[in-house]
Image (spheres, coloured by chain):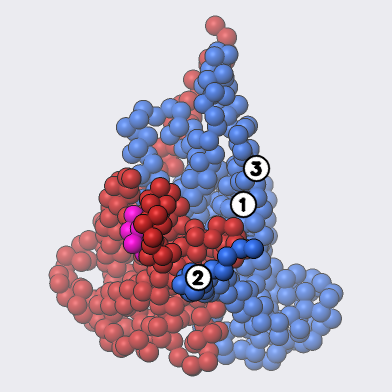
Chain colours: A blue, B red
Amino acid sequence: MTPRRPLHDIIVFYSLALPASLIILILLLLLLSQLGVAIPVLGVQGISTYTTTVWRPSYEPPQQTIIWLPMLEPPERGAWYGLLPAIWGTLVSAITAIILGLTFTIALVVFIEEIAPRRVREVFSTIVDLMAGLPTVLYGVWGLAFLGPLLHRYFMDPVHSYLGIIPLFSCEPLSGATVFTAGVLLSIMITPFMVALVQESYRSIPFTLKEAAWSLGMTRFEYVRLNLSMILPSIASAILLGFGRASSETAAVTLVVGNAVNIGFCIFTPAYTISSLIANQFTESQDFPYMLNALFAGGLILLVIGLVVNSIGIILLRRVRF
Amino acid sequence: MDDRFLVDRVFTVIVVVIAIIAILPIFHIIAYITWRGLPIVIDNGLSFFTDVPAAVVAEKPGGIAPALAGTAFMTITATLIAVPLATLAAIFSVEYPNHVLTKAVRVTSRSLLEVATILIGMLIFVLLVLPTGRFTALAGSLALAIVMIPYVYTYAELALISVPKTYIEAAYALGMKRAQVIFYVTVRVARRGLARGIAIAVTKAMGETAPLLFTAFGARSVIFGGPFEPADALPLMVFQFIQTGYDNWRALAWGGAFTLLVLYLLLFIIARILVKEVRY
């Protein structure tokens, strides 16, 4: 028989369990609020909300469609809120960010861990921390005023004129505000976050393994390649979690992505991401029937993508064990 | 001489070059924002921090007082909400490590860390703004509190777990009750780690734009209208004014961006000092 817990102990338990449960409640409320407000528009436009490319606010509500039938073209009349361009813009900017960000990340981790002298290593780590916490709106104003015009003039214009036959670069960049600029800016923003994840695993590789590699007479390149191959799951995890970060960023992206309903394979065009669509259209959305609901349908998919990507990322991270 | 060493040389050079490219932007961002923002702050002097924004056609751009007041109010109130809540939850996780609730809170907190902050703004909009029919500073505080909670929780748990078990056992051996051990020993010993988490969370909250768009909304005609009126915030003002075509408002945005940068750097240094001295 276990002895009865004294009363003061029970009081401690409940006064701590209450705040803990509140945190769980917040996440539940997040999910419920997105779902709850999204349901009306999903009841009218159905699954087509996520498969159509037309964004047409109007005082005339969208026509009822078969909700389980994914359509490519919405009805001719009335309002319509198709989220595919915003989802596409989110994917394109986040993937661009991941490709560049992963390159930066690997280089930084290898440099900090294997190449830099101790002093330089500490300086670099501090700088990476400084980058990680910088208010995102500051990245945004810099992207808007400097990075966008810079990329437009010295990268997008030349690439378009020489490699314009490739669909990726086929559209003429009209300004610096494009989905590509958003991707580049995001890559800078997510790099410190990805570095932290990969670096932690890299450091957890046992010293005996590293010593063994050196004793075989490996060059630094071969040694680093071996080390990185041992922490592949954590690199995959950094990609996923970095993707989550990139797809959920709002303030900086809204300032540089161009904010236009566009979809296509060209990355030099202004576009929307889900979060920039919400940020831009929220205020006026209350004037049109179902428009606010459609924005919550976008928020819902953003939340679901975020939760799924995160769970897989965290499971992968646990697989690096020595 | 075989190719392996050539490959190695080339590899090293490429890594160094890319690593340097990756950290260049932060220096340029700091320099660029200072270059654009500092002259505006100097031109307007003290009134830049004490005036409300002027009309777009006015001769001088006015000041950013509403943004400063709003950021101060919302960051402080959000801290007052988030810190006790998240710290108590972290104490729970450390005191009852095998409880189901502990696992649930850990997973939840990790998820909340990654949730797009604009969704938090939408949640508060549904819960508070729609029912009351108005944007309020308090709604902004709540949104920022939710942003802060997972950061405070994560760092608090880390700090509390690293408190040496011998201290805690010694306290129990002296006949202290659980609550006494928690508040007189565990929390006291971990206080620097806790403070660091709070500093990081405050930095985060102070720099957030998205959760305030549909909660605090922005208000610029008075410095601060009270907790039940719309309020402004530094990042919100920068975000909205930089997108306008008016020279006056863009000037305020650059000056505000510079102010935000300085505040961020200060908090960053404070958090650094705290982490340096965590020793048991």
- Kind of residue indicated by mark 1: Ile
Magenta stretch in the rendered image: B183-190
- Residue where numbered disc 1 is placed: A314
Quadrant position of the C terminus of chain B in the picture: top left
Residue B107: x percent and y percent? 59, 60
Q: Residues within 10 Å of mark 1 (few under 14, many from 20)?
A: some
**Residue B267 occupies quadrant:** bottom left
Front residue (pair B209, A307): A307
| Label 1 element class | helix
Front residue (pair B271, A25): A25
Residue A187: x percent and y percent? 51, 50
Q: Residues within 10 Å of mark 3 (few under 14, many from 20)?
A: few
Label drawn at residue A6: 2
- Return the disc, 2 or 1, that comes first in the chain's sequence: 2
> In the displayed structure, would residue A219 be above or below residue B1?
below
Label drawn at residue A319: 3
Q: Is residue B45 magenta?
A: no
Residue B109: x percent and y percent? 54, 63
Q: At 64% from the left edge and 63% from the top edge, which residue is drawn?
A: A1
Front residue (pair A210, B222): A210
Can residue A44 be seen at all in this image of the molecule? yes
